[in-house]
Structures are given as structure tokens and as C-alpha cells.
Image (cartoon, grey):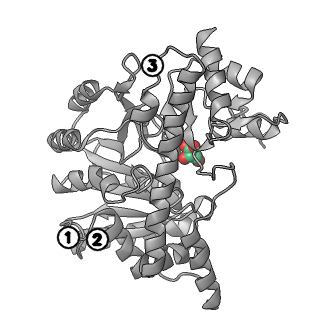
Amino acid sequence: WFANIPMGEKDPIFGILDAFLNDTNPSKVNLSIGIFRTDDNKPFVLECVRKAEKIIISKNLDKEYCVLLGGSPAFQKHNLDYTLGPDCEYNQPGRNICFQSLSGCGALSMVSQFLSRFFPGRKVVYMSDPTWPNHANVLESMGLETAYHRYYDAETVSLDFCGMMEDIHKIPKRSMILFQSIAHNPTGFDPTPEQWNEIAEEVKKRKLYAIVDNAYQGFASGDSDKDAQSFRILAKHRVKFALCNSFSKSLGLYGERIGSIIFLTDSQDEVQRIYTQFIPLTRANYQNPPLHGRRIVEEVFTNPELSKIWKKEVVMMAGQLKNVRQLLVQNLKEAGSKRNWDFFTTQIGMFSYTGLSPQQIERLSKEFHIYMLRCGRLAIPGLTTKNVAYVAKCLHKVTSE
Ligand code: LMR
């Protein structure tokens, strides 16, 4: 049946990760994927997660289906408080509906399926150029069209806010727009709160529906309220959105696939309509939400001791990323580079957009066994105090010769 289907392309992120894993050189460095690691480059499981798992095991819980197809009420309540904040006008009955999801990507995929069936306007989603390499794949696979607005100025290596606003202004009314809430992937540049206010005004004027990809809340600054400002501002302006939350990064639960979806609504009737249409989609996709990741999140949210540990750990992770960013700039100077690398420290979160050419990136992998994305994205968590000098030396080499 499939002998003649076209051969697919390698995934832009996991394809590079494969190449890294197949490289046997001991000095190889993986700057391809956004996974936080220890300074010894070892996988990191948060202490609050380890403790939560011990508590869960001690409760001797069963493994039956989660009959609440949207996830448990405690999980939903804590998600709402964590994301929208307790004072948000949408954080009350009738003004939202929350579902457990298979992390951020699973949230996006379910929201896209829902919108592709029920969105009453143009089924076109505008996104930043560039954006996470998987966004278009998820949205288009679920039947939505995609289009782009300007976001990044390669010349000045900064956010192209004017270009972004000009483009948003031209988006046909009643379309959709996808935002990243914080720590923009791949550029590392975000609008300021003042700029988010302007964006919200324009989105309201254009009558756009927003999808907000919230993959790094808490992870960017170490403060989960600060990192939630973008969509809290949208909510203040009464921009309606579907929020796609991930606990992959903030709780280090990458492989557990746990996150949530929050739709903002106007009435209990709308809540019921969304709920009754969303549940058949859940049944079609994965039947019931998985248990383990949700139990961990619930335990960390509801146990004050674990919540306290989590807060500290998020600050630690954000701090480690900021520290290696500074070290990289310092080591580039020490390696003799005369280029301006300050963007490494003005960008935030897991990624840096370096402006390196595909040729330079290929040289980095072929000659120096350093792997990053072809688009020029460098994943900061792959840098450690041990390899940063080597990476800096090689970056200087490929940008100066
Ligand atoms: C990344 O962008 O590196 C991560 O979000 C991992 C992924 O699945 O793409």
C-alpha cells in the first residue's frame, strides 16, 4: 500500500538530535533540543517531582480510566490559578473551560482540531516568522491554514515590533493568531508588557481569535506570575484565546506528556457547548487522559512543601540558563571574537537565535561535533560550565574564517 508514497523529510529538531546521538566523538555538544540538563549534562528530575512520585506510590492508587475526560477538578483549578491568576475575570465558573492535555504539543493539536471543526471565521492562523519548527506541522496536520507575520529583525538581531504590528494590522478580520507567551522559540525575544498591551488592542480591533502557546511559564524568569504577563494582558483586554500549557519544561516532565488547555468563554452555555464537542475529540484521539503526569502535577500544586521546593527549582533552572548565556559571551570575548554577541544575554529562555548561516552550522557539526538547528537556533541548556569554552572557541572559528 505504501511502497510509492513520497519519502518524508527528517524532523528539523529530532533529525539533528539523531545525528548527535550517532556521533561517537567524545567532545560532541548537543545544542539542538530544548531539554534542561544538569551542569554535568545529565537528565534532571526535579526534587519536587521525585517527592511527589514517592507520595503517589505510597497512596497505592489504582490504574483505572480517568472517568473525568477533561481531567480532575483539582488539576483544573490549580491550572487556572497558576496561569490566569486568581484575580482574572475569566477565572470563575462560566468564564473558562479547562482540559488536561498531552503536554503543550498535544494541547495545540487538540485545539487545532477543535478550531478546524468549529471556528466560525477564517481558518487561517497567523504566526511569527520564525516560530517553533513544529507549529505549522501541528496546525496544518489538523486542517488549519498557516500564514506569517514579521517578528525578528536579522539586521539588528532584535524583535521587529514595528514590522509585527504592521503585519497584524493587515490580517483579515476574524482570522486566528498564534502567540508564544514567553521565551519565544526560536528567537529568545519577547514583546515587553507595554508592547503586549498594544498587541492586545490591535488583536481586538482585527477581531482575531488567539491561540497562546505557553510552554515556558516560570522557566524564563524563575517567576511564574511574571512569565504569565502576556496572556494575562490579553485577557484584561478581553481578547479571547485558547491557552495551551505545558509542564514539560517548568516541571521537567518532558516524557510524561502533561499539560492543559484553557478556553476563555462568556457563559456557562458556551462552556457546555465546548465541553460536549471537545469530549468526542478526546475520545477519538486518546480516549482518556493519562494518570501519572497529572497526579504529579496535582501533588506538587496541592502540597505546600512541594510547591515551595518547585519554586526554588524553577529559579535555579532559570538561573543556570542565564549564567551559561553570560559565560558564553565572556568566553567568546576571551577566544578573541570581535563580533557583538550581546544578544545571547538579552534573549531569554531556552533558545538563542544566532544568525549563523547553514554553512557555518554545518561546519560546526562536521568539524567540531557541535549540533544546532539549521535555522540558526542554539539550545542554551546544552551549554555547561565544562563545554562553554570549547563551544565559544568553535563559534569564533566558524564566524571569523
Ligand atoms: C524544542 O523546540 O527543542 C522542544 O520544544 C522539543 C521539541 O519537541 O521540539
Q: Which residue lies furthest to the front in this view?
A: 334
Whether the residue carrying mark 2 lies under 8 Å from ligand 1 is answered with: no
**Secondary structure found at label 3:** loop
> Dot 1 corresponds to which residue?
267
> Dot 3 corresponds to which residue?
340
Check if mark 2's residue and mark 1's residue have beta carbons within 8 Å.
Answer: yes
> Of the residues shown, which amino acid type is indicated by label 2?
Val
Q: Residue furthest right?
A: 24
Q: Could you tell me which quadrant the N terminus lies in? A: top right
> Of the residues shown, which amino acid type is indicated by label 3?
Asn
Q: Residue furthest top?
A: 401
Task: Answer above or below: position of 65 versus 356.
Answer: below
**Secondary structure found at label 1:** loop
Q: Is residue 15 left or right of residue 281?
A: right
Q: Distance between the residues labelled 1 and 3?
A: 52 Å
Residue 319: x and y in percent read 47, 50
Q: How far apart are marks 2 and 1 (CA)?
A: 6 Å
Q: Quadrant of ligand 1?
A: top right
Residue 67: x and y in percent read 51, 83
> Dot 2 corresponds to which residue?
271
